[in-house]
Image (cartoon, rainbow, N blue to C red):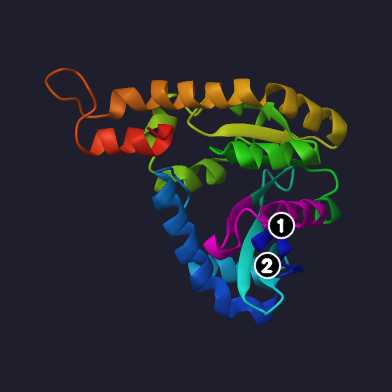
């Protein structure tokens, strides 16, 4: 069972450059399978993060690549994002994502102790992990307004939705850890556990509301062909 796997989560360096293409391919494949967006990154960009010591990489006990995540900074270091979290399909649902998030969070706090750490996610599982680290759901207005950050969303399939909402909302949920003003992780964890069924329903309503104007309709006004398939992927029916 994958839950019995042992993993090693390391700060990536030049010895891991050869894994960049595998990581990029898996990011793209995962986003396609979920039917959701992700900002694309090149192998060269991933390698840069490794050289800078701003990434973590995971392997199983046999030395097989298992996961990855990296740090991005915005607003002259005022904001930090832990981006590109990916776990190989062979090692999912075994707690590795949580290990990677903890490692990259600790690395971010070490490198940028005064920075606000934020993330955007469409997944309840990532929201749960973030909550256990002390993140809180916030509005987009509380995120960095650095144009370079928002430019990174252009490769996301939901970019048109983001721009139609004047960058104030999208399918992703924003979460933030502010070192100067935050609840304790136990408090945010308890809040998530108490409200997760409500949060899940809100995510689905949000997706339905935002996607509906962009879907092709048949003569009866129902999602047609590719649009119907997309709805099925998102809402699992």
Residue occupying image coordinates x 48% and y 31%? 171
Residue drawn at 54 percent across, 46 percent down: 148
Q: Secondary structure at mark 1?
A: helix
**What residue sits 74% from the left and 42% below the top?**
78
Q: Position of residue 6 (x, y in %)?
A: 75, 68
Q: Does 48 appear above or below 35?
A: below
Would you call the spot at circle 1 few (<14 residues within 10 Å), some (14-19), or many (20 or more)?
many
Give the residue number, with chain letter if any, for mark 1: 100
Task: Name the side, left or right, on which 171 lies relative to 121.
Answer: left
Quadrant housing the C terminus: top left
Q: Position of residue 220 (x, y in %)?
A: 15, 17
- Mark 2 — residue? 57
User: Does the magenta run of residues contain 165?
Assistant: no
Q: Which residues are magenta?
A: 83-108
In the image, residue 92 sits, relative to residue 144, either above or below, namely: below
In the rendered image, is residue 164 in sight?
yes
Residue 181 seen anywhere in this rendered image of the structure: no
Q: Quadrant of residue 68?
A: bottom right
**Rendered location of residue 12, percent (x, y):** 70, 71
Mark 2, Cα crowd under 10 Å, few <14 / some 14-19 / many 20+, is: many
Frontmost residue, 93 versus 171 = 93
């Amino acid at each position: 069972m994958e839950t019995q796997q042992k993993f090693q989560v390391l700060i990536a360096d030049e010895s891991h450059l050869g894994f960049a293409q595998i990581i990029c391919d898996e990011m793209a494949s995962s986003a396609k399978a979920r039917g959701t967006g992700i900002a694309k990154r090149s192998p060269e960009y991933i390698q840069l993060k490794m050289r800078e010591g701003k990434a973590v990489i995971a392997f199983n006990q046999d030395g097989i690549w298992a996961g990855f995540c990296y740090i991005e900074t915005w607003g002259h270091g005022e904001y930090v994002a832990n981006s590109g979290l990916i776990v190989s399909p062979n090692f999912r649902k075994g707690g590795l994502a949580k290990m990677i998030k903890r490692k990259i969070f600790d690395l971010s706090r070490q490198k940028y102790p005064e920075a606000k750490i934020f993330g955007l996610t469409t997944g309840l599982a990532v929201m749960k992990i973030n909550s256990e680290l002390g993140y809180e759901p916030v509005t987009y207005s509380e995120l960095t307004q650095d144009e370079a950050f928002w430019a990174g969303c252009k490769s996301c399939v939901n970019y048109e939705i983001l721009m139609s909402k004047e960058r104030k909302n999208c399918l992703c949920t924003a979460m933030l850890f502010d070192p100067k003003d935050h609840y304790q992780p136990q408090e945010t964890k308890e809040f998530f556990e108490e409200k997760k069924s409500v949060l899940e329903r809100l995510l689905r309503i949000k997706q339905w509301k935002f996607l509906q104007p962009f879907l092709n309709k048949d003569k009866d006004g129902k999602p047609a062909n590719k649009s119907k398939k997309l709805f099925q992927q998102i809402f699992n029916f």
